[in-house]
Amino acid sequence: MIRKTSLLAAGALLGAAASFVAGQVDFGRVSVANAASPDTYRQLTLFGDVFERIRADYVEAPDDAELIEAAVNGMLTSLDPHSSFMNAKSFQDMQVQTKGEFGGLGIEVTMEEGVVKVVTPIDDTPAAKAGILSGDLIVGLDGEQVQGLTLQQAVEKMRGPINSPIKLTIVRKGTDKPLDISIKRDVIRIQSVRSRVEGDIGYVRVTQFTEQTFDGLKTAIDKIRKDLPGDQLKGFVIDLRNNPGGLLDQAIAVSDAFLDKGEIVSTRGRHENETRRYSARSGDLTGGKPVIVLVNGGSASASEIVAGALQDHRRATILGSRSFGKGSVQTIIPLGQNGAIRLTTARYYTPSGTSIQAKGIVPDIELLQDLPEELKGQEDATRGEASLRGHLSSQDGSEETGSQAYVPPEPKDDKQLNYAYDLLRGLQANGAFPPATDAPVPN
């Protein structure tokens, strides 16, 4: 049996970028349920009676398939916030998110005043080659007005088979009339890793964990080490803020990129034989350079696995605000043409055996951002896992929720980022950096 494991809870694709809150997902797993009691079958008879009464007497003729779908989803969502039913379309969308590639144009978009606005074209994609610019307004798709469509509907129209053509009608600032631009779709890979050199420091931003993430991270680290060879490179900042998660195997691979040995994460289910442990292999891609990991209230699940592994192994200093606290494991069970169910089956634990469920990762250095005047006095914290209705309780009874998730749009105003730079350059001192290497490390 081929098993595919990922971290996923919910999400929606926005243009060429995917954004999703993560929990652990295991494709293709099959288990045998215990026999139901006679009372359970009587309850199922009750369900059948209600279903038939609705079909017979509801004021309008209901759709049978929608009734069944709603009932199944209600049963799953009553368990916890991360168990749910996915119809065939939702299941397909989820697979696109985790795969990280699809047939499309290569633009990140948002909705503004009823039309689609280009946030940015992705380098070396059909949109970039066709001359699409940041700030362009897409008002028509193959002659059909965008006005009245939802963002998701517009995105679906822009996607399609590779090499198939589409005509975009563009309104661009400074032009007198709309522009018609014809583009052929191509394979688009979601850019989940972005990097840059900041003087003598390598900055790597991981926005989510897709099938492309580890390769993107390796490419970024290799390029930074080539641009700053030897002692010119002071260290790395790995930015996981507002990263909602993604694939488990990618979270493990990203953690392994900085570790030489030891456990990365373990998962423990209802039965003892379901415990799994994932360990690092020899080889640190950074060559042992100092690492600071940034997290905040929007860092969830896969992000928390990486932060927890590097923190427990004293490989990195974690800086920012407490993470989201998503520490449960979901299994995706395909249902053929009917879609799939997402079912919570286990919790995951950091190398030290700590569950972060409903608590999150506490940074080694807690540092809050300075809020702009327009945000002061407003709610600036995420709700956190512990605030979700029906969430799995923390095993020790202690729970924390709500942590700042604001990140300034301009790096110069980013207090957490600049403090990390100062630590790596020796301009600031903190007892948590570098991590204490004489403390016990889980192996």
Image (cartoon, rainbow, N blue to C red):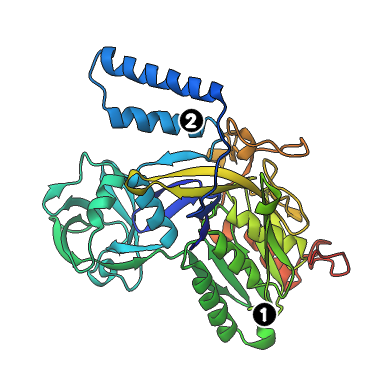
Label 1, residues with CA under 10 Å away: few <14, some 14-19, many ≥20: some
Question: Residue at horizontal 48%, vertical 49%?
Answer: 332
Question: Residue at horizontal 42%, vertical 32%?
Answer: 72
- The vertical placement of 315 against 208, above or below, is below
Q: Quadrant of the C terminus?
A: bottom right
Q: Nearer the viewer, mark 1 or mark 2?
A: 2
Q: Separation of disc 1 and disc 2 at Cα?
A: 45 Å
Q: Is residue 107 visible?
A: yes
Label 2, residues with CA under 10 Å away: few <14, some 14-19, many ≥20: some
Q: Nearer the viewer, residue 41 or 370?
A: 41
Q: Amino acid at mark 2?
A: Met
Badge 2 is on which residue? 75
Q: Secondary structure at mark 1?
A: loop
Residue 130: image x %, image y %? 22, 69
The reply to whether discs 1 and 2 touch (Cβ–Cβ < 8 Å) is no
Q: How many marks?
A: 2
Q: Nearer the viewer, residue 241 or 185?
A: 185
Q: Which residue extends farthest right? A: 438
User: Where is residue 79, by image quadrant?
Assistant: top right
Residue 287: image x %, image y %? 68, 81
User: Where is residue 386, by image quadrant?
Assistant: top right
Badge 1 is on which residue? 283
| Earlier residue among tags 1 and 2 | 2
Q: Nearer the viewer, residue 107 or 422?
A: 107
